Image: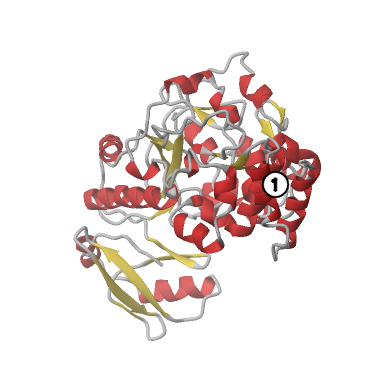
């Protein structure tokens, strides 16, 4: 487990081996040696605590679940208001468009989440229900959390205006460049390092769409925007073209005030959905959503929904494209988010011809790679089935008619039926 601590602070205090051993025992861990990674601002070094023999070189942390979370014992008093201002400045320097502070009470959101899960709107995304109330209770997910620092980073690429040609592939704009998870995590880690350099040891964990976190709700509570009727966070400055990431911290930072909503009577996002996935304002049935069908769904795409997918092969931006607030969304300043390998202008036939080796090589570092080559072909087969009939389209489909994957063969057969010529 990674620790981020101030060595200077650690040297001023001795660890209690008895406390560490007791903590481990109470949480069901055997006595063992735990490696601690210490960050002193200049580099990391590994220290160890031999709990079996009761020795500790440094004060470590508490055990939380299967991990060790850095101790949140901060010596002395701090100017927490001043620290918030510095965090804003550091966040801006790191490329975050906005930084906010949220409390840990998500009671109202928890009720909505449980209703949504009970209705089965999560489809095959079983992980949405695996963590119980931890998703809506930050202090239960990461014990000791007093505040959530939430950050947003603009992601709208400069060159991602897809043509109306149905023979070209359409990919959600966030996935045209490199995977944002790595970049966001690295920036959030640097933000945590800045804080540690200012105040010393503090407990935290970094999240960016990587754990059961209700990031839109937290960002709304932190005053970064409001939840639109399409369930995404909206801001007047950037629409919804941005990524979110969080730092769960053991710091008594005052939460910011939420902003008001500014959707009014507009329902453009609801009516623009090709599959009617919005069953009510602020309520999405993932089982009908094209992003779910092309990314999260591992099995066969329902036949009745295939014609509605059109030429979208990974995700869907329709609800965002029609949102009036996205007219004001600035372009991203991050080179990593720029389209790669011509994904914003590629034809369906071209992408369908990629071998598995091509797929893995060209999409290395891309969020698309996680769906695998099989689902990539499945999605494109559906899009080719929706494309205008042509010899080129039919030949491309026939080239995969005997593919080893039953999933691919089934979708190819469906597509060929739509091109009888």
Q: Quadrant of residue 388?
A: top right
Q: Secondary structure at mark 1?
A: helix
Residue 108 vs 122, above or below: the answer is above
Image height of 27 relative to 345, above or below = below
Residue 243 at x, y percent in the picture: 45, 39
On the question of residue 114 being in view, the answer is no
Instruction: Say which residue appears at 51% left-offset and 63% top-offset.
Output: 357
Res 86 seen here = yes
Q: Nearer the viewer, residue 225 or 376?
A: 376
| 56 relative to 294, above or below | below
Where is residue 345 drawn, in percent x and y? Answer: 48, 38
300, 153: nearer the viewer:
300
Q: Nearer the viewer, residue 122 or 142?
A: 122
Which residue is at 21% across, 67% downward? 11
Report the residue that reaches farthest toward the top: 265
Residue linked to disc 1: 394
Where does the image place residue 117, in percent across and percent down from the top left? Answer: 72, 44
Tell me the residue at 47%/70% (across/down). Answer: 23
């Amino acid at each position: 487990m990674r620790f981020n601590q101030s060595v200077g602070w650690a040297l001023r205090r001795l660890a209690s081996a008895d406390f560490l051993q007791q903590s481990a025992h109470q949480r069901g861990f055997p006595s063992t040696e735990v490696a601690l990674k210490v960050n002193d601002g200049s580099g990391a070094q590994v220290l160890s605590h031999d709990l079996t023999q009761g020795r500790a070189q440094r004060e470590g942390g508490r055990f939380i679940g299967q991990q060790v979370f850095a101790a949140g014992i901060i010596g002395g008093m701090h100017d927490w208001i001043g620290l918030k201002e510095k965090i804003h400045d550091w966040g801006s320097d790191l490329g975050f468009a906005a930084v906010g502070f949220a409390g840990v009470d998500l009671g109202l959101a928890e009720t909505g989440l449980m209703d949504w899960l009970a209705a089965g709107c999560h489809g095959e995304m079983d992980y949405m229900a695996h963590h119980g109330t931890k998703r809506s209770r930050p202090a239960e997910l990461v014990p000791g959390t007093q505040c959530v620092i939430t950050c947003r980073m603009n992601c709208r690429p400069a060159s991602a205006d897809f043509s109306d040609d149905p023979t070209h592939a359409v990919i959600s704009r966030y996935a045209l460049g490199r995977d944002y998870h790595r970049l966001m995590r690295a920036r959030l880690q640097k933000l945590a390092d800045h804080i540690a350099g200012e105040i010393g040891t503090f407990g935290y964990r970094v999240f960016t769409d990587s754990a059961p976190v209700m990031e839109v709700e937290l960002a709304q509570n932190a005053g970064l925007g409001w939840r639109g009727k399409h369930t995404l966070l909206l801001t007047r400055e950037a629409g919804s073209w941005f990524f979110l990431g969080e730092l769960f911290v053991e710091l008594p930072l005052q939460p910011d005030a939420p902003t008001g909503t500014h959707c009014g009577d507009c329902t453009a996002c609801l009516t623009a959905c090709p599959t009617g996935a919005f069953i009510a304002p602020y309520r999405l049935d993932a089982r009908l959503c094209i992003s779910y069908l092309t990314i999260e769904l591992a099995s066969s795409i329902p036949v009745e929904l295939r014609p509605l997918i059109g030429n979208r092969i990974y995700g869907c931006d329709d609800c965002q494209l029609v949102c009036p607030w996205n007219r004001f969304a600035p372009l991203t300043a991050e080179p990593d988010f720029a389209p790669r390998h011509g994904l914003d202008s590629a034809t369906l036939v071209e992408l369908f011809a990629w071998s598995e080796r091509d797929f893995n090589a060209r999409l290395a570092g891309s969020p698309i790679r996680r769906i695998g080559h099989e689902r990539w072909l499945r999605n494109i087969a559906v899009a080719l089935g929706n494309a205008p009939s042509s010899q080129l389209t039919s030949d491309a489909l026939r080239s995969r008619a005997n593919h080893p994957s039953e999933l691919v063969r089934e979708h190819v057969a469906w597509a060929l039926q739509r091109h009888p010529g």
